[in-house]
Image (tube, rainbow, N blue to C red):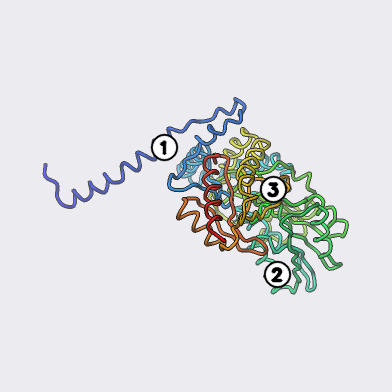
Amino acid sequence: MQFSKRQFLKSLAIGALLPFEAKSKSILQSFHKPNYSVPFTSNWDEIRSHYLLKKEYINLENGYYSIMAQPVLEAYLQDIQKINLEGSYYLRTVQFDDKLNTKQRLANYLGCEPEELIITRNTTESLDTVISGIDWKPGDEAVMAEQDYGSMLDMFKQQANRYGITNKKISLPIDPKTDEEIVDLYAQAITKKTRLLMVCHMVNISGQILPIKKICDMAHSKGVQVMVDGAHAVSQINFKLSDLGCDYYGSSLHKWLGCPLGAGILYVKKENIEALWPIYGEYGVSKTNIAKLNHTGTHPVATDIAINHALDYSLWIGIENKEKRLRYLQNYWIDKVSSHKNIVINTPSNKTRSCGIANVGIKGIDAIELAKILLNQYKIWTVGINTANIHGVRITPHLYTTEKELNTLVDALIEISNLTK
Ligand SMILES: Cc1ncc(COP(=O)(O)O)c(C=O)c1O
């Protein structure tokens, strides 16, 4: 049989696609699925086997987005297929029950009432809903830190421009000696006009864990509400919202819970719901119902369902095990480089004040340049940070990270630091 030129090109195109499709199918099918009814035995090689990883670089930038384990990804892809099959039938029937069940599980995981929780797309949406939802009056004050996340700082700036509020910024020391040192810094910034204090549960650029309960107690004693940026704390460290006593809490579940991109939560303490203005109009819902803050229109609902798969996987490993493993990995590399000349650790030396996020600099090398050197010369993917008092690359291993990979980081840091004067 003779091929026309067009048929020949068409066959080439199909042929070129086939190996990729076949490969991606077999990748999905070849993954070992954990048996959730058998308790996890701290076998971290097994965890690694659940992840499909790029061979071209060592990913030590999991703080931005922690990729899904394959069992979570596979279940998520099935959800997408199911919703694509059922179309608006799914959206008009079980969508809302599914979301409610997911919210109930999340509330249980986080330690709050389901009536105080909504599923959002991310921390930005959650915290900006609060910042923009308060009925600010000219002269009102808000307290925050230079080390807070830029998007939230920008949102406060917007309220300052729009309503004439004043934003007061403290600067967090990298290595506080006591919790009180931190609490006092925030306390000193509070005046009679302060309405809201924003604080990170875990500072994203340094990994510092802040004493949230003590900050909340102090702020409440002065009549100030506390909004916690928990982007990195949920499913990295073991805590319950009920232990913190905060007024508002936002987090991104695509970070340490291992959900698909675009999953987050907002917690609002029951008595604070009524006074918050929603961003989008929602008049069919009572003012005391947190659902009024959740009207963002049609969105990728498979992401909501996938939270269940990520929860299954995380619960199987156990939050105590997760926290212990991440802290172990962090200490593993930090202990090997911290006393080396020219190497600066921009993370508290007290190991209970951080977990899986740390920041390291090398004297004489700009952080962005250091990140480039690590990638180009050592195939290590990180991110360079030059914000407030933090200058260095952020190192965020994942549960799948091995000691061998961290040895590569250690060797690289020492080699680079030896080249500087
Ligand atoms: C401390 C902190 N807050 C908020 C955010 C924003 O998260 P998202 O982009 O998921 O909304 C981040 C993102 O890295 C963060 O590190």
Residue 283: quarter of image = bottom right
x then y, percent, for residue 122: 61, 53
x then y, percent, for residue 246: 78, 52
Q: Quadrant of the N terminus?
A: top left
Question: Which amino acid lies under the numbered mark 1 shown in the image of this protein?
Answer: Ile
Residue 361: quarter of image = bottom right
Question: Which amino acid lies under the numbered mark 3 shown in the image of this protein?
Answer: Ser
Residue marked by disc 2:
159
Name the N-terminal-most of marks 3 and 1. 1
Name the N-terminal-most of marks 1 and 2. 1
Ligand 1 appears in which quadrant?
bottom right
Disc number lying in front (3 or 2) = 3
Question: Which amino acid lies under the numbered mark 2 shown in the image of this protein?
Answer: Gln
In the displayed structure, does residue 32 sit left or right of residue 155? left
Question: 88 or 257, which is in the foreground?
Answer: 257
x then y, percent, for residue 391: 62, 61
Per the image, label 1 sits on a secondary structure element best described as helix
Residue marked by disc 3:
354
Q: Tell me the CA gap for discs 1 and 2.
A: 49 Å
The residue sitting at 59% across, 54% down in the picture is 394
In the displayed structure, does residue 413 sit left or right of residue 140? left
Disc number lying in front (1 or 2) = 1
Q: Estimate how packed mark 2 is, as few (under 14), some (14 to 19) or many (20 or more) residues with alpha carbons within 10 Å.
A: some
In the drawing, what numbered circle is on residue 27?
A: 1
Q: Tell me the CA gap for discs 3 and 2.
A: 32 Å
Residue at far top of view: 38
The residue sitting at 59% across, 39% down in the picture is 308
Disc number lying in front (3 or 1) = 3
